[in-house]
Amino acid sequence: MNFIAPSFSQRWSCGLRPAVGTCFALIDRLPVLFNEDAQKLFELNDIAAFIWCSLHEGAALEDIGAQLMDRGLSTADARASLSEALDQWVRAGLLVPQYD
């Protein structure tokens, strides 16, 4: 399945990984990311938490998109959710490019 638009795939072709000092946690069942350097908590909705955990487990972006659709999101909503989450996390310094 070619889920992610080519420009999006090429944009993150190097891959992404959590920044050093960034971790996922549940606080009273609320999913959050904690960035040690900035001493900030970032609250996640269920979709964002799923995306983060999938990335952490090494899933490909195309697979994450397909799994979001399996969970009931439309193709457009899955693409938008994935794109927005990655863009926000990169801007916040929670994800960084991974070069092999």
Image (cartoon, rainbow, N blue to C red):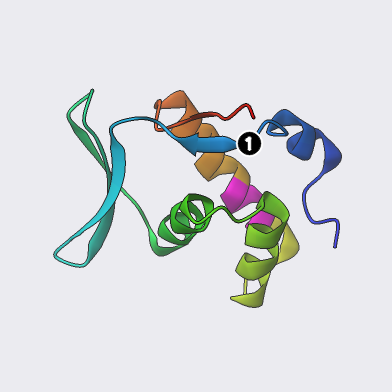
Q: Position of residue 59 (x, y in %)?
A: 60, 56
Q: In this picture, is 84 found above or below 87?
A: below
Q: Does 81 appear in magenta? A: yes
Q: Quadrant of the C terminus?
A: top right
- Residue drawn at 38 percent across, 58 percent down: 45
Q: Quadrant of residue 64?
A: bottom right
Q: Position of residue 77 (x, y in %)?
A: 65, 58
Q: What's under tag 1, amino acid-wise?
A: Gly
Q: Position of residue 69 (x, y in %)?
A: 67, 70
Q: Position of residue 18 (x, y in %)?
A: 43, 37
Question: Residue tagged by mark 1?
Answer: 15
- Residue drawn at 40 percent across, 31 percent down: 19
Q: Nearer the viewer, residue 22 or 76?
A: 22
Q: Does 14 appear in magenta? A: no
* Highlighted magenta segment, given as a residue range: 78-82
Q: Nearer the viewer, residue 12 or 5?
A: 12
**Dominant SS type (magenta):** helix
Q: Give the secondary structure at mark 1.
A: loop
- Residue drawn at 72 percent across, 29 percent down: 11
Q: Is residue 46 left or right of residue 9?
A: left
